[in-house]
Image (spheres, grey):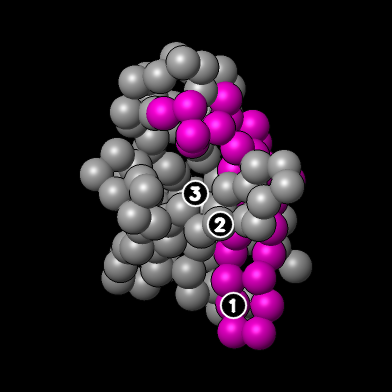
Amino acid sequence: QVQLVESGGGLVQAGGSLRLSCVASRTMRSAFRIDSMGWYRQVPGKQRELVATITTSGGNTNYADSVKGRFTISRDNAVNTVYLQMSGLKPEDTAVYYCYAHQPGYQYWGQGTQVTVSS
């Protein structure tokens, strides 16, 4: 079992920055075969949408078009942590952000952290 704990959400004005962190309770490339981690976000009444992903080997990244150039995902395997640096925040970025860890056949989720961007 892998447990994910997010932190770093909060309230920020438009144009501001936040950094989200997600700590995995086990080594990301342990026997649980985690091959990628990343972030989704969700607003009430809408489907959860992918924000950014990063592979645990090689560090290949992928971003939603809506956040390209503003958000940066990174990882530190030594401390089992994935980060999401968010800059140039917009009110439409307001959502609950969920960290995930993927292994073949299964996906783990964190509890979510609220990000609110005021105009």
Disc 3 versus disc 2: distance between alpha carbons?
21 Å
Instruction: Please name the residue shown 34% across and 55% down the image.
Output: 65
Circle nearer the viewer, 3 or 2: 2
**Vertical comparison of 56 with 31: above or below:** above
Q: Which residue is mark 2?
A: 49
Q: Position of residue 56 (x, y in %)?
A: 42, 67
Residue tagged by mark 1? 103
Q: Is residue 80 left or right of residue 75?
A: right
The reply, left or right, for residue 85 in relation to residue 101 is left
Q: Are marks 3 and 2 in contact (CB under 8 Å)?
A: no
Circle 2 sits in a helix, a strand or a loop, which is it?
strand
Front residue of 60 and 42: 42
As drawn, the label of residue 94 is none
Instruction: Name the residue: 33% across, 30% down.
Output: 87
- From what the image shows, is residue 81 above or below residue 55? above
* Residue sticking out furthest to the front: 45
- Magenta span: 90-116
* Mark closest to the chain's N terminus, 3 or 2: 2
